[in-house]
Image: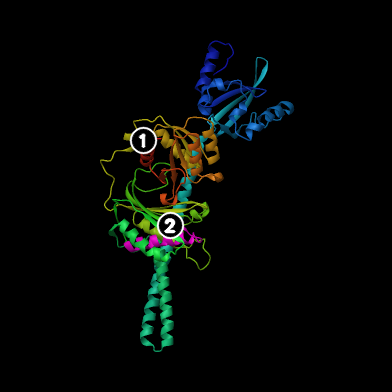
Amino acid sequence: MQQKLPNGGPEASKLEAILNSAVAAIITIDISGMIDSVNPATERIFGYPAGELIGQNVRMLMPEPFHGEHDSYISNYLSTGRRKIIGIGREVMGKRKDGTTFPLDLAVSEFVAGGKRYFAGIITNLSDRKRVEEALRESERKLAQAQRLESIGQLTGGIAHDFNNLLTVITGNLELIEMSVQGEHVHKMLRDAQEAADLAAKLTSRLLAFARRSHLEPEILETNDLVLNVTSMLRRTLGEHISLSTVLAPDLWQVKVDPTQAESSLVNLAINARDAMSKGGKLVVETRNIRMEEVKSGDTIELPHGDYVQISVSDTGTGMPAEVRDRAFEPFFTTKTRGHGTGLGLSMVYGFAKQSGGHVTIYSELGHGTTINIYLPRANGTMDTDAVPVDAELSRKRRETVLVVEDDDGVRDLTVTRLVTLGFKIHESSDGASAIKFLESGLKVDLLFSDLVLPGGLTGYDVARKAREIYPGIRILLTSGYAEDLLRAENLGSIKLLRKPYRLADLRSALEAVLSEPP
């Protein structure tokens, strides 16, 4: 414990040992709010050495509104005796030396020593608990969503199967009637009825695709050829107001899927993207190889480890709010007006990917567009047995300092954990304004790693421009779930973009590539 302890021989030594070994931060202040003593845990939690704390007002460890109101808490208690926190405890926010904030549990007690009144605060960092709680909530949300889709799929598959049987009877009898009656007028009515039955059959086909009960005829396909065939057709149908481009990875792995279902999936995604860009925009179809390692906590792609081909369809449309994104794969769920969609397009894509042994994810920001990623297993693909595990390449620790800018708490926590694992020193911000404020503080930053879409009106590009002004030699790595062709920065020169979702190996490679370039 920094600061003097009462003389007491062995008892004082024992007390000091207890305070020094405590996991929780323990701070004592006088009645004016000035810090009188701190223990080592306080230094670890808040990032200040004891010498910078003792003699300072304890409000320096608090963000607003606690910072501005703290002294009034003490004065009100001393004048009225009413306890609002003393002896009660509460959850508040703390502020570290680097400006970042974190949740903490604060328990305050009062004592007298040497004829003077003091207050003691015992502070527990709740960040880890919050991360665990958030991860648990996210896991529960994903499980509930998967169970809901599975239940809907079972119900939908049964209904579609029975409905197909009914349609078989209807269409068969329509054919027999057409063969046995005369008259063009009657034949036209029969043809209209047959067309309606055919449309109903297509509807049930989509329902069966969602329920993963379609009859698939998989073939070994060159995915880039598949994409080129579909996009050449789409260029004639999407309209002149949509700019369509492709970014195709060389040496793309083959996949074994049903070509008709694969083409239908891409067409459905393109039509959805077009409808989200009523005033025009850009549509990019991108392919790449991706290797799934063992699933780690916080990852958003829940697939067995192995090799996959990723097909991404990105647009610059309206984007989806979270409540729409969570229900997007449900059959008949649609935000389109009546008569402008059945709500089966995305559910069919979901069922096709799942039945093919893959997965589908949605990355969307309201007002910033959407990217939908289809993951299909590599044909006869497995993990390379001679591939170097990520952990084996982490022995060379870095010394650089990285400023992480990410508004999603879960993604930011995972990113910080990964960067610490790679040996980097970390500072973090949750929005563009606080990131710029941190850069202006003068603390050393070697690399800016920022999401592109941030709250508060500032983008990752804005933060990057400001970072270049303050530190002309700073390295910059941006990340986004959107295709790179949709993200063109002006006046920033060549800048590397890491596509979400990414693995630890992808992050390491991108960072090493950026840091190896000249400033």
Q: Residue 272: tell me if it is visible.
A: no
Closer to us: 161 or 337:
337
Quadrant housing residue 220: bottom left
State the SS at label 2: strand
Q: Is residue 41 above or below residue 331?
A: above
Q: Is residue 114 above or below residue 254?
A: above
**Kind of residue at badge 2:** Leu
Position in image of residue 344 (x %, y %): 44, 63
Q: Would residue 209 appear left or right of 62 to someone viewing this image?
A: left
Give the mark toward the camera: 2 or 1. Answer: 1
Camera sees residue 219: yes
Q: Secondary structure at mark 1?
A: helix
Q: Point out the stretch of residues depicted in magenta.
A: 259-282
- In depth, the one of 361 and 479 nearer the eye is 479
Q: In the image shown, does 418 or 233 lie closer to the viewer?
A: 233
Total number of numbered discs in the rendering: 2
Q: Along the polypeptide, which appears first: circle 2 or circle 1?
A: 2
Q: How far from the left and from the top, in percent, is residue 109? A: 63, 25
Q: Label 1: which residue?
A: 516
- Depth check: 372 or 261 in front? 372
Marker disc for residue 283: 2
Quadrant of the drawing holding the C terminus: top left
